[in-house]
Amino acid sequence: MLQPYPGHLAAFLKKRYTLGKIKKTKRATLFMMTLRQIRHFIAVAETGSISAAAQAVFISQSTLTLAIQQLEEDIGVSLFSRHAKGMTLTHQGHQFLRQAHLILATVENAKRSLQQGAEQVAGQLIIGVTSLVAGYYLADLLIRFQRAYPNVDIRVMEDERPYIEHLLVSGEIDVGVLILSNLEDRHALQTEVLTHSPHRLWLPAQHPLLEHDNINLSDVACEPLIQLNVDEMGVNAQRIWSRAGLQPKVTLRTASTEAVRSLVAAGLGVSIQPDMTYRPWSLEGDIIEARPIADLTQTLDVGLAWRRGTARPSMVDPFLSVAREQPHPGRRPSI
């Protein structure tokens, strides 16, 4: 369950700083922060400029500038980097944005529960999804949304990522649930990462690499590699190996995750896969081991995407609220 919003902010600040180092002012303390300040901060984060954000929240640029400066002073960190083309979030700003979305989602859920029962919310939500996400991520999200909003009609369209992007930008679907790492039209889409799935090496039982204290990509490059190509996973793999400056020995490519499991378990090769797809046995019942790769920190980012800059369809906000409540570690909104 989500905590009340002061708890989220306290957790954020305590993680980055000791509470004793939080800067205090005469005008405000941690628990006097207002929802208006939080909404103003989110507006600047999403638009990337004071002028655009001021128009979005219907206040003057000078008032909004002062509000952001006061917020940064109150919590004792710089949330934005200022430059000629606008404002971008700092690392601390990204952390704060994550908590800010959770705060507003909690408040909206509380208001909704008081103002109307979920059964009174009705309409249609059209969701676009890519195949790998559909198989390993979508079901739980849809179940929780249907339980919360039983009178919303949900339509799901599965297709390749480029076409899902096209449908989002054209307004033919409301929201996408997909791998965000490969998005192309980021200027037209607002995104929010729901989970960062780390990569691990899948190996058969008793493989020699299981005896290693640390496994590196250079170790994997010497092994026969089974490559999953569904949902642009081949592109993801090329990115990994290119950054490492290594050439893997790919012996087989397949669009089936189950085939990867069976081939690895049978000892025909190893495979690098995101953790969200891991299961410790194949369909034949053979064991599959998984180990971290010491020099591979890249994650597969799964999340939501919706059209930027226009009024959202009425069912998108309830869907976002349910998705944000999902207990996935490391969720990070992005702009």
Image (cartoon, grey):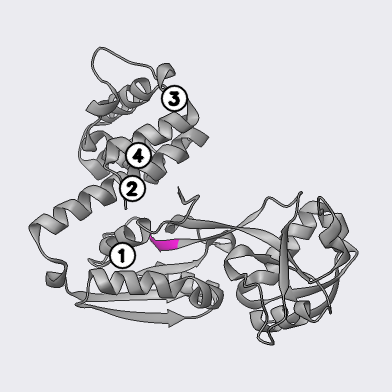
Is 179 within the magenta? Answer: no
Q: Position of residue 237 (x, y in %)?
A: 72, 65
What residue lies at 77% left-to-right and 77% top-to-bottom? 264
- Helix, strand or loop at mark 2: helix
Q: Which residues are magenta?
A: 304-308
* Residue type at numbered disc 4: His
Which residue is label 3 attached to? 77
Q: Is residue 15 left or right of residue 108?
A: right
Which residue is label 2 attached to? 102
- Helix, strand or loop at mark 4: helix
Q: CA distance from mark 1 to mark 4?
A: 21 Å
* Residue type at numbered disc 2: Leu
**Does residue 58 sit above or below 210 in this rendering?**
above
Q: How many marks?
A: 4
Give the label, 2 or 3, closer to the camera.
2
Whether tag 4 and tag 3 are in contact, CB under 8 A, the answer is: no
